[in-house]
Amino acid sequence: LRGQVLLLHSSSTDPQLVCKLGHLLSELGFGVFLDLCSQTELGSRGPAAWLHSKLDHIQKHGGKALLVLSPSTLQRAELYWKIAVEKQNNPTTYSSDTLASALGCIFADRQKGCAAQRFVLLQMDFHELSINEEHDMPMLLRGLPLYKLPSQSQGLLMELCLESPNNMSGKLKKMWWMKNAQRKLAQGVQNI
């Protein structure tokens, strides 16, 4: 396996898009966790406990949580920040789904200065989002690595790939894999 990935999304994000993205990453050798594929476990444990167990797992294995951006995700992140910082209330009392739990984890990690170590933002090139600059991003999500797919497929793969070979043969294999994986991911995303 290349690494562990937890795919996070808002409930309004097209489930087919998220599942296909998860499938693409899985085909490239990543271990992928997705709430849409874990309904039984999610139902028995609850969104917060399920999310924390997956975050702990990927952290132990050097993985990342990918937050798929959508208008709804951006609105919820903005609202979370307003409630948590400006009103100084607990935002989790307003919503109890996986995304709300993820935003809570991002907020907690931000307070510790380590959110970018666990969380990565993912924007599909074909989504019309008004994120062109850092200041366009909700405060809660600022400072997190942002990759646009398919145009930044290679950057995302570099972020997710754990392997750091130290011999020439290993470096050539990784380079070859990266080139093929970038092409497959970019083509796969374009076909979603």
Image (cartoon, rainbow, N blue to C red):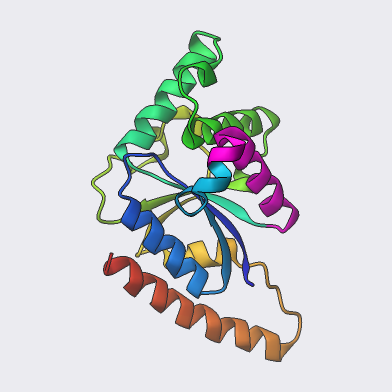
Q: Quadrant of the N terminus?
A: bottom right
Is there any visible trace of residue 74 in the rendered image?
yes
What residue appears at the point 68 percent right and 72 percent down from the top-left corner?
A: 163
Query: In the displayed structure, does residue 165 sit left or right of residue 99?
Result: right
Magenta run includes residue 191 = no
In front of the other: 168 or 42:
42
The span shown in magenta is 43-62
The quadrant in which residue 137 appears is top left
In front of the other: 155 or 162:
162
Where residue 52 appears, as percent x and y from the top left, is 65, 39
Q: Quadrant of the C terminus?
A: bottom left
The quadrant in which residue 151 appears is bottom left
Where residue 20 appears, as percent x and y from the top left, is 37, 63
Is there any visible trace of residue 120 in the rendered image?
no
In front of the other: 14 or 143:
14
Magenta run includes residue 57 = yes
Is residue 28 placed above or below 148 in the rendered structure?
below
Is residue 157 placed above or below 66 in the rendered structure?
below
Query: In the displayed structure, does residue 49 sit left or right of residue 151?
Result: right
Is residue 12 placed above or below 92 in the rendered structure?
below
Is residue 33 placed above or below 192 in the rendered structure?
above
Query: In the displayed structure, does residue 185 sit left or right of residue 71?
Result: right
Tell me the chief SS of the magenta region. helix
What residue appears at the point 70 percent right and 57 percent down from the top-left corner?
A: 62
